[in-house]
Amino acid sequence: MIAFSTIKINLFIIALLLSCQFLTAQNSVLVNFGSNTCSTSVVPNFSLIKGPLTGLPVMLANCDLSAQTANFYSVFIAYNPKDNKVYVADIRNNIQTKIWVLDVGLPLNMRCPLTIPVAPTYAYSYISNNFEFDNNGDLWSFSNYNTATGQCNMDKFDVNTGTVINSRILQFPPGNFPTTIQSGDLTILPNGRMFASLGSGICRLYEIKDYSSTTTTASAMYLKTLPRDCYGIAFINGTIELTGSTFNGNCYYYDYNITTGVLGAEKAFQNGQLPIDNTSITPAVGCTKQLVNAVKVNSNTVDITYEIYAVNMGNVVLNNFQIIDNLAATFGAANVSNVSASFDVGGNGAGLVLNAAFNGTTVTEILLPGQNLPNKILLNKNSFCKVLVRCRATNLSASTVYYNTATTKGDIGSANIVSLVNVSDSSNNGETSVVDPNKNGNAGDVGENIPTPFVFTTLPVKFVAVSASFVNKQTVQVKWNVATPLNDAAFFGIEYSADAINWQQIGSEAIYNTNIGQYNFTHLTIPAGKLFYRIKQTDTDGSFVYSSIVLLNNSSVANSFVFYPNPATDKIQITGLVLAAGENATAQLLDAAGKILMEKKITLAETNLQVGHLPNGNYLLKIFTAKKAVVEKIVIKR
């Protein structure tokens, strides 16, 4: 009976942990280098610890490194988001850095490496003082500290060769210089913020500013003097964990709230281990949702368009990525019809596939199951997606506020009950910038999951048409038509973006006459590259709605063009083609062998090629005139 009760309690605790994980937007795994016991043992190992700040941490793996390094002193550990591997650096002889690259099975599994060679993967003369990878896979370290000036070098170096790629001066604040940079650690959040704990005897916590700039001196902002020396630091669920040991059986950690600046009480380090250096594997997801259009059909019916933005905010690929929108919970299942989902312009760099069965009532999953969402590496735009959800809602009441929430989720690890780590985030009302307003890397904080409201009596302006065209090589004219009268409308804001993610207002038009439906704006001195435009209409009460997005391509080459989406499903849109007077252009779609599958004369500002009948695969899109031909690769994927 006792054994059976214990099993029931343990299973209940595990089930509770799993259910709680599904409610968090970030669910970090702590990677600890040190020893598997907090005693005087110096046997080096590294471990993977799930739920490190929950009070019930779970040891996923405990990996012996005694064959690689004799002890744990002057050894660092870092997780690399670019290849999903763990790197261990040994600088004990202060002559050479030795680095082992360890495959811990991500993103599908979390385990000790199947084999760990005794010989290091890399060895070179550059000596790093602590090191950490940013989300681009760049490796950062400190070197050459001058205790008199409070300056050291902030180095980005090549992990393969030890070559310093670039270095800049890092200035610590007067009165709060670290006693040394050889004792401590640094961590980099997936959003790029860097924190460091440095010093022996007196240990201080800093945020490192402008470390990646090539034109300014980096600076360290003093945050806190720590109660004890902290040799390890890691980013865990929107907070900083700082770890250390007295090496006589006392191993401890503190949590530091990035938003409030509050340092938590001292606690015993997880699972009775000894920490020397830390890093973290951080699955995280964020989501926003905004009302972008609503058109009144009759006295109780409206056609609504929502935009859902979902983004991988962590440093690891998310498995089983999904977006859920339950329209029935908002309007009632019997009141929802004409439901559809489509990717916004530039909103599917990851090549995700929509779920054709999605209806917002009995089927609420917008994506087909079993897909992955990459983490952001370098300038890739494949770590997010934007989906437009359209529906007709009927039997609406003017006295009701209809709140709607989308949910995103994903996981890492294997599907067994121990190692699976889930993340989930409900949407915050607004555009992409409100996904993480306090910029602590966690989209699930209080005030960051506000449902999107809709009131039938305050319908936004209906955009009839939006267009953009070149006046000349330096100027674009944006035109838009709206249905009148423009009741309660205050002004239009004209917004521009180079990537359809980050927008800036470039002008505004006040609404003086509610019966005028045609407007235009001239964008002067346009930049090169892709030009995305949209119109934001704001009401007198501050509510707003967006138009659809239009796209141009600014190039001095007369017959350059823009095509999207890529991957394509049913059609390819071609726009931005600039032709000289009397010049003609032709679009051809070819298979991988060069066979022409379709051909179409381009006579309009935007041309569509219907490709819904073609099988999935790689194709070539060729646009040519009498003077020049341009060929681009395109993928058809459903």
Image (tube, rainbow, N blue to C red):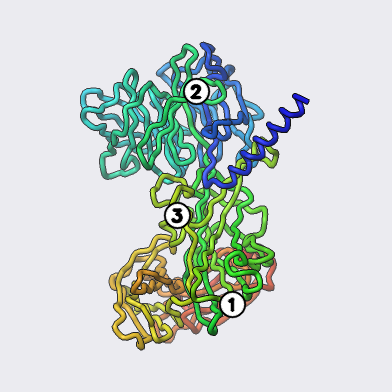
Earlier residue among tags 1 and 2:
2
Q: Amino acid at mark 1?
A: Thr
Q: Position of residue 453 (x, y in %)?
A: 48, 66
Between the C-alphas of marks 1 and 2, the distance is 57 Å
The residue pinned by badge 1 equals: 394
User: Which residue is found at the position 70% from the left and 35% from the top?
Assistant: 11
The residue pinned by badge 2 equals: 268
Q: Observer-nearest residue: 50 or 8?
A: 8
Earlier residue among tags 2 and 3:
2
Q: Is residue 238 above or below residue 250?
A: below
Q: Is residue 425 left or right of residue 221?
A: right
Instruction: Residue 86: tell me if it is visible.
Output: no
Q: Position of residue 192 (x, y in %)?
A: 40, 44
Q: Amino acid at mark 2?
A: Ala
Q: Residue 435's mark?
A: 3
Q: Observer-nearest residue: 105 or 408?
A: 408
Res 471 → quadrant:
bottom left
At label 2, counting other C-alpha atoms closer than 10 Å, the crowd grade (few under 14, some 14-19, many 20 or more) is some
In this rendering, the label closer to the viewer, 1 or 2? 1
